[in-house]
Image (cartoon, grey):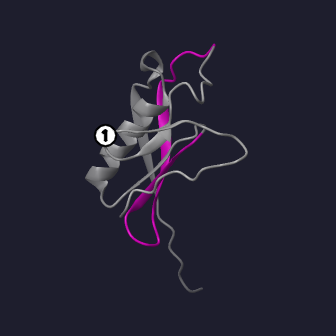
Amino acid sequence: MRTRSPRRSSVSPMRWERIASGTWCYASDAMDVSEGRGSAPEVIFLVEEAPEGGFTARALGESIFTEADGIAELHEKVRDAVRCHFDEDHVPKVIRLHFVREEVITA
């Protein structure tokens, strides 16, 4: 699975940075929404199998998204994305992955 670079938007120019795993994220000061909030005890990701293979992970309540080919790579990319999204003193202590699998059966 290829790492996709972020799309440029003419509406709101944001600064992007690429972290070690190849994941793109907003520069830490570009989306500072943590002002006045303490560190969340955990962040929960909804993990689904991607139609083209691999997995996608989307955080609930935060603007974090990443994708990976396998589980081990997903763990690494989710950790990197969380560290990228939160300031150092606001990083959640626990990352919870909630795997969802949709299955269709005949009635």
| Residue depicted at x 39% and y 70% | 53
As drawn, 49 above or below 82 = below
Say if the magenta span includes residue 51.
yes
Amino acid marked by disc 1:
Ala
Question: Which residue is farthest right?
Answer: 11
Foreground of the two, 14 or 53: 14
Find disc 1 in the rendering and name its residue.
20
Say if the magenta span includes residue 47.
yes
Instruction: List x then y, in percent, for residue 74.
Output: 34, 51
Instruction: List x then y, in percent, for residue 13.
Output: 65, 39
Instruction: List x then y, in percent, for residue 25.
Output: 48, 40
As drawn, 22 above or below 37 = below
Instruction: Mark 1: give few (<14), some (14-19) or many (20+) Cα within 10 Å.
Output: few
- Viewport quadrant of the C terminus: bottom right
| Residue depicted at x 60% and y 37% | 14
| Residue depicted at x 60% and y 50% | 8
Residue interval drawn in magenta: 36-60
Please tell me whether mark 1 sits on a helix, a strand or a loop. Answer: loop
Side of 101 where 69 appears, left or right: left
Q: How many marks?
A: 1
Question: Which residue is farthest left?
Answer: 72
| Residue depicted at x 59% and y 21% | 34
As drawn, 27 above or below 56 = above
- Viewport quadrant of the N terminus: bottom left
Q: For residue 29, what is the image quadrant?
A: top right
